[in-house]
Image (cartoon, rainbow, N blue to C red):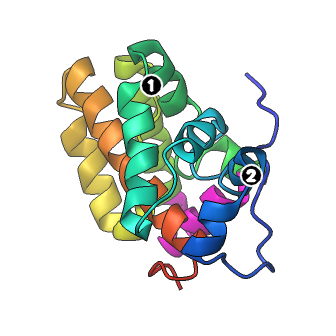
Amino acid sequence: MTQSPAPQHPAHTAPLSLEAVNALSADAFTDYFAGVLEYSPQYAQAAAAQRPFQNVEEVADAFKDAVQADSEAAQLKLIRAHPDLAGKAALAGELTAESAHEQASAGLDRLTPDEFAEFGRLNDAYHEKFELPYVVCVRENDKDSIFEGARRRLANTPEQERQAALHEISRIARLRVLDLIADGDGK
């Protein structure tokens, strides 16, 4: 399935202050935060409705709450929007800017042939068992812990894995929100 690129926050633009985030129009907020959740700007739209925010954590929580309030089918669609780690999209340069940066931060763009083959096997096993990609907040892990987590989570039930993936997605979203707000800790 080919997905159209999500609007991306320009890397050269300085993060906005929380005051400026609260002052954005709903459309501007949605555009600015569209890349927080992979190809899912509807969650930015839902988060916009929760303003004004008192702090950056409230912004991150608004994304998490919007996902948790959505249907199971929509949650599965969100999980499936995430790319395989070190997968074909990464090799082809088809990741969102956020995902490419995050995978590189964990060294997934510098795998040995054996590591790349192992990721291929793990990705295939995930798709076969869960019909989902393995989703993990790579910025909070390294190569070894990502491998270990994938092996461990393959023992999950489909419901446990859906919950684990949603938990990881909320961690990814939080870090992306922090990157976009000047008084966040995303630096």
Residues rendered magenta in the picture:
96-114
Which disc, if any, is residue 25?
2
Q: For label 2, count other residues whose C-alpha is less than 10 Å away and answer few (under 14), some (14-19) or many (20+).
A: few
CB under 8 Å between discs 2 and 1:
no
Q: Nearer the viewer, mark 2 or mark 1?
A: 2
Q: Is residue 66 left or right of 104 when viewed as pictured? A: left
User: What residue sits 56% from the left and 37% below the top?
Assistant: 43
Compare residues 92 and 96 and report the one nearer the observer: 96
Compare residues 41 and 113 and report the one nearer the observer: 41
Dot 2 lies on which element?
A: loop
- Whether residue 89 is visible here, answered yes or no, is yes
- Answer above or below: position of 62 versus 68: below
The amino acid pointed to by label 2 is Ser
Q: Position of residue 128 (x, y in %)?
A: 41, 19
Give residue 46's quadrant in the image: top right
According to the picture, the residue beneath numbered tag 1 turns out to be 75
C-alpha distance separating marks 2 and 1: 26 Å
Q: Position of residue 134 (x, y in %)?
A: 41, 39
Q: For label 1, count other residues whose C-alpha is less than 10 Å away and answer few (under 14), some (14-19) or many (20+).
A: some
User: What residue sits 44% from the left and 35% below the top?
Assistant: 66
